[in-house]
Amino acid sequence: MQLAITVLGNKSNGFIAEILSALSACQCSVVELRTSNLTQITAAYVLIAGNWNHIAKLEGMLEAIKVRFEIQMSFLRPDETPPVLEGVPYTLETISMDKNDVLFAVTSFLLDRGICIEEVTASRHQAAFFNTLVFSTKFVLLVPPEVRILSLREEFLDFCDSLNIDAILEPIKR
């Protein structure tokens, strides 16, 4: 059985170590863990595995941690058999002048064409040597077999030109 946990809390709390301690005490194992600091907030998500009684015990311990550290936390038990998706893994990176609609536009473009977005990272930062804000994204994609890569690449580059976005779309190599 698996349990997905999302957490938001103050950066200085040290609540991640407490959550990992509870996982260990309940004999659950980490399948995946990601954390990120967003200004003064730490965001985390954890996918754990264990048998049903260990996960039930863990949920009780996590509720106590939530109250003690004054953090926001939510749980979700994912389906046991996730759908198997076929396709070619690609990475997509963009950089542009900071505009509010870039992330929405790129995401909509991909979803409208049936591209599966596995992961997105985006940030706004000061350009080196200049007083200009730039917006950059990195996507991990799964391009289905029925999508013609050359057509997708050409259409995407035209799309980027129209929005003044510089982009790289390439397969993930192992």
Image (cartoon, rainbow, N blue to C red):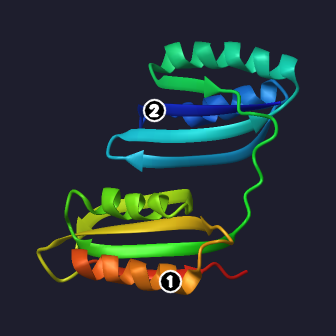
- Residue 126 horizontal side relative to residue 56, left or right: left
Q: Hey, which quadrant is residue 89 in on the image?
A: bottom right
Q: Is residue 105 visible?
A: yes
Q: Residues within 10 Å of mark 1 (few under 14, many from 20)?
A: few
Q: Is residue 164 visible?
A: no
Looking at the picture, how far across and down is residue 2, in whole percent?
Answer: 77, 33
- Residue type at mark 2: give it: Leu
Residue at x 37% of width, y 46% of height: 38
Dot 2: element: strand
Query: Which residue, given by chain and number where applicable, does mark 2 sit on?
Result: 8
For the residues labelled 1 and 2, the Cα–Cα distance comes to: 41 Å
| In this view, 38 is above or below 52 | below
Q: Quadrant of the N terminus?
A: top right
User: Which one is in front in this view, the residue at disc 1 or the one at disc 2?
Assistant: 1
Q: Residues within 10 Å of mark 2 (few under 14, many from 20)?
A: many
The one nearer the camera, 117 or 4, is 117
The one nearer the camera, 43 or 110, is 110
Residue at x 69% of width, y 12% of height: 60
Which label number is shown at residue 151?
Answer: 1
- Residue 126 horizontal side relative to residue 23, left or right: left
Residue reaching furthest left? Answer: 131
Residue at x 26% of width, y 66% of height: 125
Q: Quadrant of the C terminus?
A: bottom right
- Residue 172 horizontal side relative to residue 124, left or right: right
- Residue type at mark 1: give it: Ser
Dot 1: element: helix
Q: Earlier in the sequence, mark 1 or mark 2?
A: 2
Q: Are marks 1 and 2 in contact (CB under 8 Å)?
A: no
The one nearer the camera, 159 or 127, is 159
Residue at x 69% of width, y 72% of height: 145
Looking at the picture, how far across and down is residue 123, in whole percent?
Answer: 34, 61
- Residue 85 horizontal side relative to residue 169, left or right: right
